[in-house]
Image (cartoon, rainbow, N blue to C red):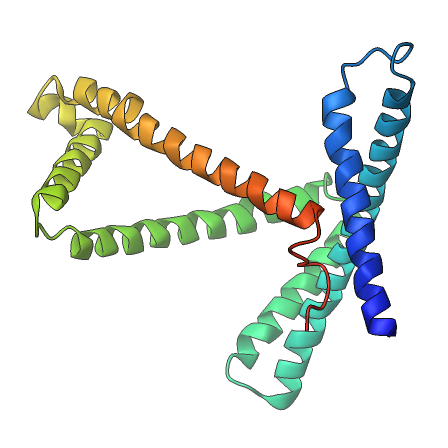
Amino acid sequence: MNLRFGRILATTVAIVVGLFILASTFVAEWPGEIFGLSGLINQVSLLFISWVTIVAAFALFLGFANVISVHWNRIQTRKPGALYSIVLLIALAATLAVGFLSGGPNSNPSQFIFDFILQPLESTFFALLAIFIATAAFRAFRVRNLETLIFVLFTVIVLLGQVPIGIYLWAELPVIKDWILNVPALAGVRGILLGVALGTIATGLRVLVGTDRPYTDQK
């Protein structure tokens, strides 16, 4: 009984909050002196948004504690990858110590960590990602039919048009590359975004009416 009540309560809270936030989007431009409820709806929706910010901040702390707990347990049980957990926890403690002792994230030691440790690591990861994408693309670009041939042809044109050597190979390559990106590629991206938007609206409506309840235990 208590579990069922918890499900009903969570569903009701989610529906009410979602409807207030949705309503504030449509009544934001209404003049308050004509529509007396518009100001109330906007104020309540802002209150809900501020609550969400507070909850997200606590969730960040919970995630931080969970990372420490998971890696500490891995170190204690000596599971594979325990050495990486040790490095992670040491780096985490050192970064926190530098941030607290030096005066926050805008201090010189904190900026040194971001500029000379974090950013080079990110650049390295992105470089490795580019290599993995290139090798995967090489395996995928096997001409089996007409569609694959067109895809490979457009890809080669765009890649050559992006690099400086492309203009020396053919002066029109950058122009063709821009047309591909601005016309067919952009049209495809807009179609995908429209599909994502429609799917998001449908999912949101299902959550608002209580059909989908991802925020409760549905067992």
Q: Which residue is drawn at 55% across and 50% down?
A: 118
Q: In which quarter of the image is the N terminus?
A: bottom right
Q: Which residue is drawn at 40% across and 37% down?
A: 192
Q: Where is residue 111 in the image (x, y as percent from the top left)?
A: 65, 42
Q: Which residue is drawn at 84% across and 10% down?
A: 31
Q: Return the residue nearer the eye: 49 or 66.
A: 49
For residue 65, above or below residue 57: below
Q: Where is residue 3 in the image (x, y as percent from the top left)?
A: 82, 72
Q: Residue at x 11, y 53 (%)?
A: 142
For residue 70, above or below residue 133: below
Q: Return the residue nearer the eye: 87 or 207.
A: 207
For the image, the number of numbered tags is 0
Q: In which quarter of the image is residue 178?
A: top left
Q: Can residue 137 be seen in this view?
A: yes
Q: Position of residue 58 (x, y in %)?
A: 81, 55
Q: Return the residue nearer the eye: 145 or 195.
A: 195
Q: Position of residue 4 (x, y in %)?
A: 81, 69
Q: Is residue 100 visible?
A: no
Left-right relation of 60 to 136: right
Q: Quadrant of residue 153?
A: top left
